[in-house]
Image (tube, rainbow, N blue to C red):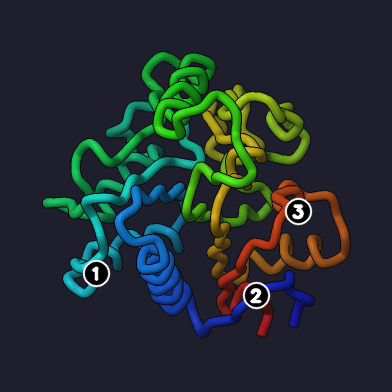
Amino acid sequence: MIRLPENTTVFDDGEAVARAAAGHLRTLCEDAPNQRFAVCLSGGSTPKRLYTLLARPDYATLPWSRLHWFFGDDRAVPWDDPLSNVRMVREAFGTPSPIPETHLHPIPTADGPEAGARRYEATLKAFYGAETLDPARPLFDLVLLGLGEDGHIASLFPGKAALDETRAWAAAVPEAGMTPFVPRVTLTYPVLASARSVLFLVSGAGKQDPLARLSQGEDLPVGRIGGSPLWFVDRAAAGA
C-alpha cells in the first residue's frame, strides 16, 4: 500500500467515502449550532456521490436553512453546460433541492474567467464581511477537495500562474492543465486553507499515482494546501 498522508482513513469504496464525508459534515454542523455554516464544494465523481447522498431523506435534519454552499472552482462555461460544476451540483442535489435558492453561490462564468474571478472574490468578501482573511476566523467551515491525476486541486494545476497567487481570493486560469482544456476560475490557496476543516475525497485506482508521487516528496499542487487536512481514501486509490 502507498504511504498515505497523515490523517488518512481508508474506506472500502467511493460510496463509503461519501457516507463518511456526510457524517463529517453532520458532526461539524452539530458542533456549530445556530451559526451560519459555509461549505466549499468540489467537482468530481466522489464529491458528486456525496451531494446525491445529502439530498436523501436521511439528511433532511441537516440545518439547511443556515448552510451556504460555495465552489472551489469551475469551468468558464454556461451553468447549464455539461462541463459546469454548477450543473453537476444542481443535478446531484436534485429537484426540489434541499438548498435554499439564495444559499447556493455559483462562480459567475458568463463574462469569462477574469471577470468571474473578480466577481466571485467580491461575493466571498461580502459573505465574510472583511477584505482580508483572519486566521482566527475561517471563511469556510468545510472545504471539500478532490485530487486530480496530475496532482491538481480545484483548478490549481502544475506549472500554472494561479499556484503562486497569494493576494487574490479567486484567480483566472486561462488554460487548464488537463482535459477539458477550457478556461477556469479557481479559489487560491489562502482561501481554500481558510477553513475549520479541509477534507480530501479520493477514490479510484487512477489516484494511486498522485498519492505515490506526493508520498515521495514531489512538489505537487495538492502538497501546498498546508495545515492538517483530513483524507478519506478508498482502497483502490490507496492500492490496498
Q: CA distance from mark 1 to mark 3?
A: 32 Å
Does the rendering let one see residue 53?
yes
Q: Quadrant of the N terminus?
A: bottom right
In the rendered structure, are the residues bearing label 1 and label 3 in contact, judged by CB atoms less than 8 Å apart?
Answer: no
Q: Position of residue 209 (x, y in %)?
A: 73, 64
Q: Is residue 183 left or right of residue 190?
A: left
Numbered disc 2: secondary structure: strand
Q: Residue furthest left?
A: 96
Q: Is residue 207 left or right of residue 131?
A: right
Q: CA distance from mark 3 to mark 2?
A: 14 Å
In front of the other: 237 or 228: 228
Picture quadrant of residue 217: bottom right
Q: Quadrant of the C terminus?
A: bottom right
In front of the other: 128 or 96: 128
Picture quadrant of residue 147: bottom right
Against 142, residue 136 (above or below) is above
Q: Earlier in the sequence, mark 1 or mark 3?
A: 1
Please tell me which residue is depicted at 73% across the width and 46% down the height of the picture. Answer: 221
Question: Quick one: label 2, few (<14), some, or many (20+) residues within 10 Å?
Answer: some
Numbered disc 3: secondary structure: helix
Q: What residue type is disc 2 on?
A: Thr
- Determine which of the numbered discs, if any, sits on residue 59 in the image: 1
Question: Quick one: label 3, few (<14), some, or many (20+) residues within 10 Å?
Answer: some
Residue of label 3: 223
Against 205, residue 74 (above or below) is above
Please tell me which residue is depicted at 45% across the width and 29% down the height of the picture. Answer: 129
- Determine which of the numbered discs, if any, sits on residue 8 in the image: 2
Q: What residue type is disc 1 on?
A: Tyr
Q: Position of residue 182 (x, y in %)?
A: 52, 29
In front of the other: 188 or 66: 66
